[in-house]
Amino acid sequence: MDEGGTVPPTPELEQKLRGARLRVTRPRLAVLTAVRDHPHADTDSIIGVVRANIGEVSHQAVYDVLRALTAAGLVRRIQPSGSVARYESRLGDNHHHLVCRSCGVIVDVDCAVGATPCLTASDDRGFTIDEAEVVFWGRCPDCSTQPHTTQSSARS
Ligand SMILES: [Zn+2]
Ligand SMILES: [Zn+2]
């Protein structure tokens, strides 16, 4: 159904922008809302959601907003190898990701054990470690129940 293009008020997101010393603008709110509602979305999906909400916005504008939000620490950019950049607004809990090798779906997994960084390096080489980034690769339940097929069936 058509929602009429009205953006619901998002006081807590406005507060986040102000807290990060970013001016509150419609594109910024729309991008932040899209990332919050669609965790791990890629840029193209975010642009689609933003356009559905506030109308025409240029790709460049959305890229710029994503860069500003990432730099301000309001959005986290993740990029599993072989994947385009994805964005999420679940921050600061040092959670990790499960990635399906077959369909590319990304799922959150809570911190492995305890608090940040939740993993102990066998040798920290004198670093003060504050974060560990782990990607668990495998096949999601949907894919693992299907017979193994090669992803790119070459057609001549
Ligand atoms: Zn899958
Ligand atoms: Zn996540």
Image: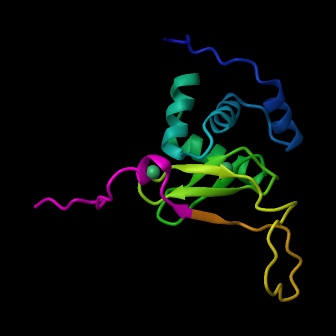
Q: Position of residue 13 (x, y in %)?
A: 79, 32
> Dividing the image into 4 quarters, which one contains the C terminus?
bottom left
143 relative position to 42: left or right: left
**Residue at image x 74%, y 53%?**
110
Where residue 6 appears, as percent x and y from the top left, is 62, 14
Q: Is residue 14 above or below residue 73?
A: above
**Residue at x-position 67% and y-position 66%:** 134
Q: Predominant secondary structure in magenta? A: loop
- Residue 67 visible in the picture: no
Residue at point 88% right, 87% down?
Answer: 126
> Where is residue 117 drawn, in percent x and y?
83, 66
Q: Is residue 65 left or right of residue 60?
A: right
Q: Residue at x 32, y 55 (%)?
A: 147
Q: Is residue 60 above or below residue 53?
A: below
Q: Nearer the viewer, residue 28 or 125?
A: 125
* Residue 133 in the figure: left or right of residue 148: right
Residue 150 colored in magenta in the image: yes
Magenta-drawn stretch contains 149? yes
Q: Position of residue 95 (x, y in %)?
A: 74, 55
Q: Which residues are magenta?
A: 137-156
Quarter where residue 23 is shown: top right
Residue lying furthest left in this view? Answer: 156
Question: Is 26 located above or below residue 133 in the figure?
Answer: above
Residue 80 vs residue 28, the one in the foreground:
80
